Image: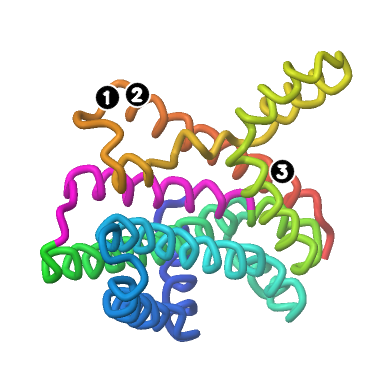
Amino acid sequence: MSINRIFVLAKNVFQEVVRDRILYIIGFYALMLAIAFRVLPEFAATTEDKMFLDFGMAAMNAIGLIVTIFVGTGLVNKEVEKRTILMLIAKPVTRSEIIVGKYLGLSAILAVLVATMTAIYLVFLQFGNIPHPTASILIAAIFLFLQLSLMTAVAIAFGVFTASLLATVLTFAVYLIGNITQDLVQLGRLSRNPGMERLTQGLFIILPDLSRLDFKNDAVYGLQALPDITGLITNAGYGLVYGVMLLAIAILIFSQREF
């Protein structure tokens, strides 16, 4: 693969998403925080600080997930439906470069999105004199980006061989189940049913364990005063390796498609 061609493809994806005004959603996030900042004290006179902390992280997660799923599943499908994929593969660019370029382009958008929303979030916390663990929030934001990057790989993997609507549903299902895979394993053990236990173990092995990339509770409730560096590196490595595996699967499937 050529790094220059991948960079050009990623740059085109980034510019295309910007032209679609996706980044305008940052303004929507700021508006949501401003409304919550004014409204929450009316409903929770003593716990508004924790509620605002929780709301800001949850909204950031939700907005990032919406962009990831709806944009990611259409990155390849849109090219196929518009038949522009024929012009793309006719150029001196491999199909693997197309997949990697589109993945990196959307990942760059997500990086800008998460970084900007995190900055806005911290400004509101500082302006409102709300006690907050800045280091834990930054760690949670970094791992949110890793989680969204992993879901981007999931969305692209589904998008290369299914319709956009089905790919969207499947990606959202993976996200929901991926956040409770450890609970599913415990449920299978409690059921004492060998079939159920094998099913839950299989889901745990196949689907990504997204809870390993979720540090929102640590940021909001201060569950961990000092981060476990080894654990952070291990979890980050897990997300990166899983994402690479999904991209490899997407490349394999896309290379077999006929247009």
Per the image, the residue denoted by label 1 is: 228
Judge by depth and name the residue closer to the eye, 88 or 142.
142
Name the residue nearer the viewer: 2 or 114: 114
Query: Which amino acid does the dot numbered 2 rest on?
Result: Gly
In this rendering, the answer to whether 149 lies above or below 183 is below
Please state which of the two labelled residues, at mark 2 or mark 3, is closer to the viewer: 2
User: What residue lies at 29% left-to-right and 45% top-to-bottom?
Assistant: 219
In front of the other: label 1 or label 3? 1
Is 176 on the left or on the right of 190, as rendered?
Answer: left
Give, as a three-letter code, the residue at label 3.
Leu
For marks 1 and 3 on the same chain, the one whose residue lies earlier in the sequence: 1
> Which label number is shown at residue 252?
3
| Residue 43 x/y as whole percent | 36, 71
Q: CA distance from mark 2 to mark 3?
A: 32 Å
Q: Which residues are magenta?
A: 130-154
Marks 1 and 2 close (CB-CB < 8 Å): yes
- At which x and y percent is residue 65? 52, 61
x and y, in percent, of residue 2 in the image: 46, 51
Residue 248, horizontal then vertical, whole percent: 62, 40
Q: Which residue is mark 2?
A: 231
Q: Is residue 7 visible?
A: no
The residue positioned 60% from the left and 63% from the top of the image is 69
Asked which secondary structure carries label 1, the reply is loop
User: Is residue 221 left or right of 90 when viewed as pictured?
Assistant: left
| Quadrant in the rendering for residue 181 | top right
> Is residue 182 rendered to the left or right of residue 43?
right
Q: Is residue 175 magenta?
A: no
Asked whether disc 1 touches disc 3, contact meaning CB atoms under 8 Å apart, the reply is no
- Asked which secondary structure carries label 2, the reply is helix
